[in-house]
């Protein structure tokens, strides 16, 4: 579904990702794991058209999206749940979800809002509460729900567990698995490598802007280098 090949991107004179290549097959959960500053979020921003690569290609469903604008990429079928959630703090839960459907012109938006509320009942209870007054976990649910409102074929999740309590993290990863089981392909960026690898089919390890390892999630979880660097020295 998504093929990233030889992509170079960064900020000004700083090159954050260096000649990276990876694939996300349709129906899979693929993880990009790595430490802070490895280039994970830059990769997500580049796929979404928020940054433009200086080299390489990004193909989605056989179409090169390198030079497309972000709203056109959303229309084509990719949504991003950004790092730090970035919900609209001064708008209600309901309004945040409506904004997630801003590229759509069909008459099923209300139906999809109800589907988000079924997935996250707490958001239904707080539908007219301002987004900024929600807990961190509730804001993450809202960020995921907002992204789903665009009806993506491919959902990009950037550090969905960041800053959340362990029980909430467990719920979020369970939700990611359910969204995938319902037919949405997922590219997951995570510092919580253990949790990411538990739910992923395939994984890539990013270090200082370069992919240094890749394989099935089980292969990566059992790799001694990954165990030492990201899994506390042992696998589960």
Image (cartoon, rainbow, N blue to C red):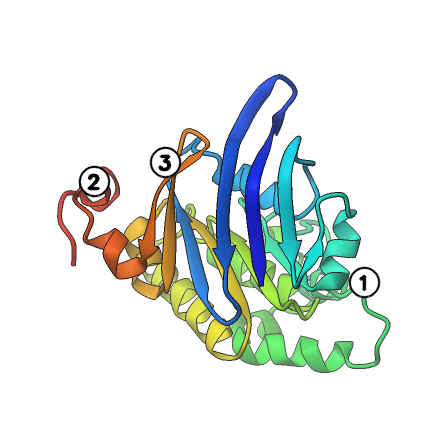
Q: Which residue is mark 2?
A: 225
Disc 3/disc 2 C-alpha distance (Å): 13 Å
* Coordinates of residue 106 in the picture (x, y in percent): 84, 77
Q: Is residue 230 above or below residue 108?
A: above
Quadrant occupied by the C terminus: bottom left
The quadrant holding residue 171 is bottom left
Quadrant occupied by the N terminus: bottom right
Please name the residue shown 68% across and 71% down the image: 151
Q: Secondary structure at mark 1?
A: loop
Q: Are marks 1 and 3 in contact (CB under 8 Å)?
A: no
Sequence-earlier tag: 1 or 2: 1
Q: Are marks 3 and 2 in contact (CB under 8 Å)?
A: no
In-front residue for pair 185/97: 185
The quadrant holding residue 101 is bottom right
* Coordinates of residue 210 in the picture (x, y in percent): 43, 34
Position of 218 with respect to 12 (left or right) is left
Disc 1/disc 2 C-alpha distance (Å): 43 Å
Sequence-earlier tag: 3 or 2: 3
Q: Secondary structure at mark 3?
A: loop
Disc 1/disc 3 C-alpha distance (Å): 34 Å
Q: Secondary structure at mark 2?
A: helix
10 Å crowding of disc 1: few (<14), some (14-19), many (20+)? few
**Residue that lies at the very extreme toward the left in this rendered image:** 234
> Label for residue 35?
3
């Amino acid at each position: 579904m998504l093929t990233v090949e030889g992509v170079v991107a960064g900020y000004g004179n700083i090159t954050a990702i260096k000649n990276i290549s990876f694939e996300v097959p349709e129906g899979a959960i693929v993880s990009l794991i790595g430490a802070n500053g490895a280039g994970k979020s830059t990769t997500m921003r580049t796929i979404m058209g928020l940054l433009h690569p200086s080299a390489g290609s990004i193909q989605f469903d056989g179409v090169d999206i390198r030079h497309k604008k972000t709203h056109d990429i959303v229309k084509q079928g990719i949504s991003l749940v950004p790092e730090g959630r970035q919900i609209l703090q001064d708008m209600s839960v309901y309004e945040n979800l409506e904004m997630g459907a801003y590229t759509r012109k069909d008459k099923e938006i209300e139906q999809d809002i109800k589907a988000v509320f079924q997935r996250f009942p707490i958001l239904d209870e707080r539908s007219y509460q301002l987004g900024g007054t929600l807990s961190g976990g509730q804001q993450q649910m809202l960020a995921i729900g907002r992204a789903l409102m665009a009806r993506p074929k491919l959902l990009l999740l950037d550090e969905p567990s960041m800053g959340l309590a362990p029980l909430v993290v467990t719920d979020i990863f369970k939700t990611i698995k359910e969204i995938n089981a319902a037919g949405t392909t997922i590219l997951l960026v995570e510092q919580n490598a253990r949790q990411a690898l538990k739910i992923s089919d395939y994984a890539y390890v990013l270090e200082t802007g370069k992919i240094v390892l890749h394989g099935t999630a089980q292969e990566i979880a059992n790799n001694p280098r990954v165990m030492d660097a990201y899994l506390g020295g042992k696998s589960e």
